[in-house]
Image (cartoon, rainbow, N blue to C red):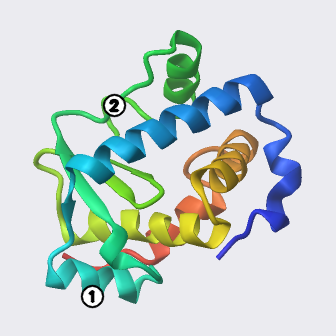
């Protein structure tokens, strides 16, 4: 797995004011999901543990019509341009909060998103993980981002 220390240079690629707004948005969405989402069932807890989550009981899942977009126009445009959010996106992880689009919940996607939870846990917080993750996306693109490659490598079969 990757740590914030290993990729500090990547985080410099993100414009700090925009990054601060992205972290604030992500923390707000995560708090909403923590308050309204549901805990993993027994199978989900086992799968989360299998992909490296240390505190699977803290995960909350919220099923949504579509993944939320930031209201901030500049932040929204950056998220869409980077391919992080938009009509094709089916899952989003922010700390221990997982959002999944209706009709897309399956073991493969849930284990992928749980691996992102493990990455957040290793970094320590949304504020520590997001700059590194976004810097990596900006540097090599979404598909080639090491965090995405790692999550794909830990997907469990349906």
Residue 147 vertical placement versus 100 (above, below): below
- Residue at left offset 56%, top offset 21%: 75
Residue that carries the numbered disc 1 in the rendered image: 46
Farthest front residue?
35
Element under disc 2:
loop
Numbered disc total? 2
Farthest top residue?
73
- Residue at left offset 32%, top offset 41%: 32
Farthest left residue?
103
Q: Say left or right for 25 vs 67.
A: right
Q: Nearer the viewer, residue 116 or 60?
A: 60
Residue 141 x %, y %? 64, 44
Q: Earlier in the sequence, mark 2 or mark 1?
A: 1
Q: Say left or right for 30 vs 45.
A: right
Q: Which mark, residue 68? A: 2
In contact (CB < 8 Å): disc 2 and disc 1: no
Quadrant in which residue 39 is drawn: bottom left
């Amino acid at each position: 797995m990757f740590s914030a220390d290993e990729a500090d240079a990547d985080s410099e690629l993100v414009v700090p004011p925009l990054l601060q707004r992205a972290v604030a948005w992500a923390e707000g969405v995560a708090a909403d999901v923590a308050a309204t989402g549901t805990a993993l069932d027994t199978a989900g807890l086992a799968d989360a543990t299998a992909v490296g989550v240390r505190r699977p009981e803290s995960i909350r899942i919220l099923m949504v019509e579509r993944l939320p977009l930031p209201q901030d126009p500049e932040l929204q445009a950056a998220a869409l341009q980077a391919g992080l959010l938009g009509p094709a996106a089916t899952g989003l992880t922010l700390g221990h909060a997982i959002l999944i689009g209706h009709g897309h919940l399956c073991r493969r996607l849930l284990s992928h998103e749980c691996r992102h939870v493990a990455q957040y846990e290793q970094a320590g917080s949304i504020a520590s993980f997001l700059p590194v993750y976004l810097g990596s996306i900006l540097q090599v693109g979404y598909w080639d981002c090491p965090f995405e490659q790692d999550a794909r490598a830990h997907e469990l079969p349906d």
